Image (tube, rainbow, N blue to C red):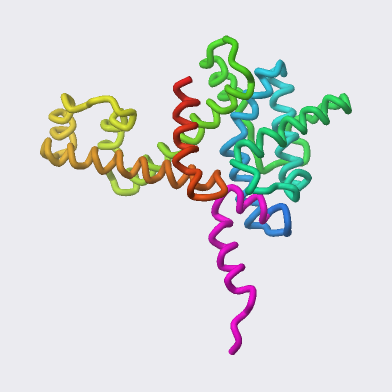
Amino acid sequence: MGKDPNQNEQSDNAGFATTCWGIVIAAGHRSDAAAEAALAGLCEAYWLPLYEFARRRGYSTADAGDVTQGFFAQLLEKNYLKSADPERGRFRAFLLTAFKRFLSKERDHDRALKRGGDLSLVSLDLERAESQCRIEPIDDRTPESLFERRWAITLLDRVLHLLEDEFRHKGKHQFFAMCRGSLTGLGMEEQHAAIAAACGMTESAVKVAVHRMRTRYRELLLAEIAQTVSCESEVEDELRALIKAVQA
């Protein structure tokens, strides 16, 4: 039997569809319920950086919620997806550029999109968003720099939750809760004895387990970052950029 000429392309697309860019391209060029659901998941994960961007641009809580919800409604309806090109850079840059264009269009048409609307896949927790906004200092940071910072924090939180879920499924949630502080790079060696006693481990076993936890955290972080860039060579650069954004 002759080889299907599309077999390699289909296989490649199946692998790439697990990335943010792959989801966007798939949703923008074909009607696929799985791609739509995955795109909605991206929206759920990364709406907060855009909401904070709108707030720093002067939108009220309600209006920022409206435009963020409205933007994702348009995104899910594919208005912004067919022109998406992963070769142009990182997914977060695409998302912010598309959001700026959306805000400009909404301002030019002088119309507001109400929360909810035709979009039911993305739920915005505005109370949580406002509590996050209050954490940020009122300074001369640009909306763009705050978007970068919130994007980085959101991604780090996702990775932390993924790691926590892994430990929970292994029945090691207590160990994770006691050792998660080590993921920040802060020394916790003086607590190893207490952790060992609480978890029924030796101190040396705790030390090894903490090292493995930090290694796994980095693996998950790099994997998450890899989903938001167009090629593997950008992962380390993106990691440095995100760390810089958090520390700024």
Residue 77, given in percent of the width and then of the height, sits at 76, 47
- Please give the name of the residue rendered at 83% of the width and 25% of the height, measured from the top-left corner: 107
| Above or below for 27 versus 45 | below
Residue visible at 59% across and 26% down in the picture? 147
Q: Residue 196 colored magenta?
A: no
Which quarter of the figure has residue 55? Answer: top right
Give the image quarter of residue 118.
top right
List the single residue furthest toward the bottom.
1
Q: Position of residue 161 (x, y in %)?
A: 42, 38
Q: Main secondary structure of the magenta part?
A: helix
The residue range painted magenta reads 1-26
Most foreground residue, 17 or 87: 87
Query: Most extreme residue toward the right, as rendered?
Result: 109
Q: Nearer the viewer, residue 195 or 155?
A: 155
Residue in the image at 62% along x and 24% along y: 144
Residue shown at the point (59%, 36%) measured from the top left: 46
Closer to the camera in the image, 16 or 202: 16
